[in-house]
Amino acid sequence: MKNTRQHLWAICLGLECSLAFGCNLANPRELTRDKAKSLLIRSGVLQPQTQVAVSESAYKLAEKDGVFKFRVVFGPEGTNPDTYLSQEGRRYFHNYCWMGRLTIVNSPIQIQVIEISGITDARPGEGELAEFKWGYLDAPEFVNKYTGTTGPDKSYYGCASFKLFDDGWRQTDVKWKKCVG
């Protein structure tokens, strides 16, 4: 009888400790931040990128340093401004698009998910949305200098859609900007 009480006492104490120290009894039907991050990483959408956005301040620095040049092109429609890469700029970048302020770098840059910043229900029957913070991983210094895209304060938000199937959660869509709403 005494051994039975001690045995029950040990079981209760063990259960209480497990719950107190965060025993992972997560519901497989619940999309957690860790699960969303893991699914996003495994989905293959975080492929190395060659297109990198250029911020206004980084563009001005690159223009000052002679990476980007500005000229006026005369044509039948009148005058048009044009920004192009200088010889120096071609060392770092393959191409530049003024309208979208995008550069195409010579070597792809890896993207990383920094954190899942929130999860919310999507429309009924459409699963859940996870907002995430992302950034460039180990970008060359010239990319950071002339695009302003890396560093501790340089991160961006994206939004991923997830849907629960009979075999678990799947990532169904990614938008590389903040979730709407």
Image (cartoon, rainbow, N blue to C red):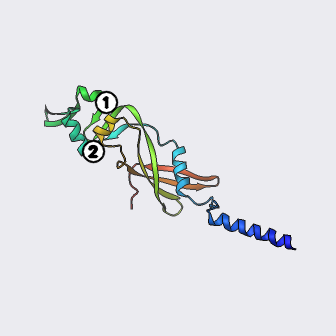
Residue, x 64% and y 61% (percent of image)?
23
**Mark 1 — residue?**
92
- Residue found at x 71% / y 65%: 14
Looking at the picture, tell me which residue is in the foreground, 55 or 141. Answer: 141
Query: Where residue 34 appears, x then y in whole percent?
Result: 54, 54
Which residue is identified by label 2? 55
Which disc is residue 119 wearing? none
Element at label 1: loop
Classify residue 53 by image quadrant: top left
- Apparent side of residue 136 relative to residue 89 in the rendered image (left or right): right
Numbered marks: total: 2
Mark 1: few/some/many CA within 10 Å (<14, 14-19, 20+): some
Image quarter for residue 31?
bottom right
Q: Give the class, few, some or many, for how many residues have Cα within 10 Å of label 2's Cα (few <14, many ≥20).
A: some
Is residue 158 shown left or right of residue 25?
Answer: left
Locate residue 32, reporting x and y percent: 55, 58
Closer to us: 68 or 161? 68
Given the image, on which type of amino acid does mark 2 rest? Answer: Ser
- Disc 2 is placed on an element classified as loop
Give the residue drawn at x 37%, y 48%: 152
Q: For the point 81% across and 68% down, which residue is it?
A: 7
Mark 1–mark 2 distance (CA, rounded to whole Å): 16 Å
Image quadrant occupied by the N terminus: bottom right
Q: Position of residue 82 (x, y in %)?
A: 19, 35
**Quadrant location of the C terminus in the rendered image:** bottom left
* Above-or-below relation of 69 to 126: above
Asked whether, in this view, residue 13 is left or right of residue 105, the answer is right
Amino acid on which the number 1 mark rests in the picture: Tyr
Against 134, residue 73 (above or below) is above
Q: Quadrant of residue 71?
A: top left
Q: Is residue 28 above or below residue 141?
A: below
Which residue is more in the foreground, 155 or 79? 155
